[in-house]
Image: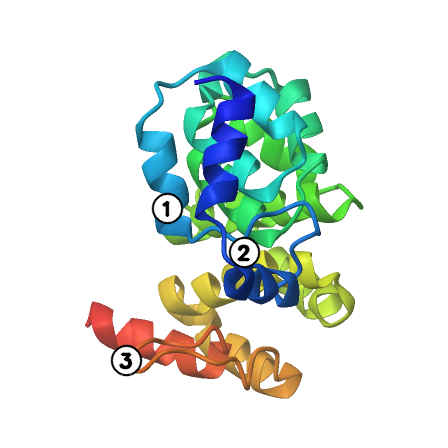
Amino acid sequence: MKTKQILAELESLGNEARRKHNEKAGAPANQFGVLLGDVRKVAKKLAPDSALASELWGTGNVEAQLVATLLMKPAELSVDELDRITRSTTCAHVADWLNAYVVARHPEQAKLEAKWMKSKERWTLRAGWNLTAIRIAKSAAGLDLAALLARIEKELPNAAPEVQWTMNLALGNLGIHHAEFRARVLDFGEQLGLYRDWPVSKGCIPPYVPVWVPAMVARKS
């Protein structure tokens, strides 16, 4: 499939209701309103292809960029290339797929994390906090957790919304996986009130830390 064919197929799968939903979530005008499941179906027809992924990403179209994240070969991207791609992210949905399917699988993710945690640009900083949150949960060796919590307490209240999401993930993971910080995490989360009224489907856990952390700790016990 060529880029034009893929765009045509994605456009045929779009619907206005989903488009409006995406816009409310921060997506730009360059999108078709395709359900994420349908985006995955389009990508499944294609083999991993760095050149095609680059073309799709370059269109700036939300769904094309989502497909691109599933076609990229992380090991073929240099740190500088992935930094450039991350900075050109169009919206949170794309950022989440890029972080999950490309950044988190990159052989030099430690170098990327160190660079991005010093960034002032929203998408790279979001990605940096995502990598840090993963380390907090899986292997915190080498991390100064007390310093990270202090930084979160200082920066989270006034961070860009895109950055707040993964910084909140790091905060939650500190409370879930490191009991010595749990009380402090819960107290700060309650004071801040971030995502307190976040809508969730029945049976799902909201990202509001005072609810999310105890629920996940209970699951672990």
Q: Mark 3 highlights which residue?
A: 203
Image-based side of 163 in relation to 12, left or right: right
Mark before the other along the chain sequence, 1 or 2: 1
Residue drawn 62% across and 25% down?
82
Q: Residues within 10 Å of mark 2 (few under 14, many from 20)?
A: some
Three-letter residue code for mark 2: Leu
x and y, in percent, of residue 137 in the image:
39, 53
Say which residue label 2 marks.
Answer: 145
Rendering coords of residue 29 (x, y %): 70, 51
Residues under labels 3 and 2: Cα distance?
31 Å
Give the amino acid type for the residue marked by disc 1 in the picture: Asp
> Given this view, does label 1 or label 2 mark the residue nearer the observer?
1
Which residue has dot 1 on it?
Answer: 38
Q: Earlier in the sequence, mark 3 or mark 2?
A: 2
Q: Earlier in the sequence, mark 3 or mark 1?
A: 1
Q: Which mark is residue 78?
A: none
Q: Is residue 10 above or below residue 53?
A: below
Please report contact status of discs 3 and 2: CB closer than 8 Å, yes or no: no
In this rendering, does residue 157 appear at all? yes
CA gap between label 1 and label 2 equals 40 Å
Which residue occupies 69% across, 33% down?
A: 115
* Residue 97 percent location from the top left of the image: 48, 43
